[in-house]
Amino acid sequence: MKSLYFVGAGGIGMSALVRYFLSSGYRVGGYDRTPSALTEALIREGADIHYDDNIGTVDSVYKDPKETLIVYTPAIPATHGELSFFRQNGFEVMKRSQLLGLITRQKRGLCVAGTHGKTTTSSMVAHILKQSSVDCNAFLGGILKPYDSNLMLSDKSDLTVIEADEFDRSFHTLSPYMAVITSCDPDHLDIYGTEEAYRESFAHFTSLIRPDGVLVIHKGIRVETRLQPGTKCFSYAVGESADFSARNVRIGGGTILFDFVVAPGVLPQYPLGCTFSDMEPGVPVPVNVDNATAALAVCLMCGCSGEELRRGLKSFGGARRRFDFYVKTDSFVLMDDYAHHPDEIKASLRSVKELFAGRHVTVVFQPHLFSRTRDLAPGFAEALAIPDRTILLPIYPAREQPIPGVTSEWLLSLVRSADKTLASREDLIARLKALKEAGQLDVLVMMGAGDIERLVIPACEALA
């Protein structure tokens, strides 16, 4: 194999693989539906990427089935023209998750799964390890800001941090050395059908952890564990007893401090337990205390010292689109967040309300997928009632066709909030500018997993 061709190259998970094979000296090409900052970055790094589903525009170097491996993301429809061509002409065609599983099987995978929290937690693990004497590789589901990449490579460590994606059961291709489960709130019901099937996929994931490995699981979540003999299981929590816990959480003055506590008997090096006092997340939002507790537990078990944990957590700059502040002043705040599941939105907005207590919070939310909006509508309605003002954009369809009756207008009708409205992508910036000029825009959160991120910079330019 001399070349690889990625169908859906601009996806966050796919792009890490594109970068990995470019760094390994392979010829890499691919297709994505629309240009983005990520696809443009990949092109600058040497990838051949185009945006027209037309096999005639694909370079001949990728048309030899003996020389090219085809990789695709399940978000690509089966009717896609280029993908159909490759399947019909003798190419080896592989899912992204299968390729990631092959790459990492010979390494010690640190796999972070969960409905929400997995990108930030895996990014924290990667950063803390990278800044320590331990080091690591990483395939992340977000762009880690201090590195401007979702890929990390090491020439001395076989530890490999992986964001374990449950969509299409992709995380079932992994063989974790250590696994984290941050949450298991049913999602992707268009794939799984029922909440029970969704939770079952996480139960199966636990059975894949190596016999010499470890599961770190959030206390209280409803996941049946099916560990192999010899696999250890530890709990983590905030504000309550667990094997690893965050206690004495203090929020104020734009910072968060907490004590990271290891319970007695959990780790052989701390038979009586241990407390690491005054740990400070570099991205000081309350929900990150939860993420940090899991990340610190993993990094401690991988060999980081207390000082390396402290330094790494404080210097963590965050992943793009996860509590990503663009403006943060006493008079105006603008932040971007990827939250798109009701429980994730609740956690994010409650953190914002706590962090900016007494200030007026506006959220602009772009629902993602018609099926998710339909299946989880009551949860969305509850979450979107948290801010002081809610503005809904049209539903971002992604891979789906519209579902009759499932619209942002319908979702907004379920939200019990006095200040709620709809906006189009085209008139959103003007609406926000008018609110700002009238002195009615204080803390603005732009939220969703679709293309709302493309409106963040225009909003900054108009409002800052």
Image (spheres, rainbow, N blue to C red):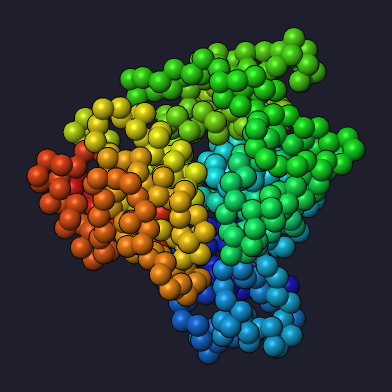
The residue at the point 35 percent across, 29 percent down is 355
Q: Relative to 208, is 78 on the left or the right?
A: left
Q: Nearer the viewer, residue 312 or 97?
A: 97
Q: Please state which of residues 79 and 283 is positioned toward the viewer in this rendering.
A: 79
Q: Is residue 46 visible?
A: no
Residue at the spot 65% in from the left edge and 50% down from the top edge: 164
Residue 219 in the image, given as x and y percentages of width and height: 65, 31
Camera-side residue: 262 or 65? 262
Rendered-image quadrant of the C terminus: top left
For the image, the number of numbered tags is 0
Q: Which quarter shows the N terminus?
A: bottom right
Q: Position of residue 421 (x, y in %)?
A: 25, 55
| Residue at the top extreme of this rendering | 272
Q: Quadrant of residue 360?
A: top left
x and y, in percent, of residue 389 in the image: 26, 45
Image height of 340 relative to 227, above or below: below
Residue drawn where x is 43% and y is 22% of the image = 256
**Among all residues in the image, which is located at the extreme right?**
229
**Residue 160, x across and y down, in percent:** 69, 45
In the rendered structure, the answer to whether residue 226 lies left or right of residue 157 reads: right
Against 312, residue 391 (above or below) is: below
Image vertical order of residue 6 relative to residue 153, above or below: below
* Residue 95 can be seen in this image: yes
Residue at (59, 60) in percent of width and height = 189
Please tell me in which quadrant of the rendered image residue 304 appears: top right
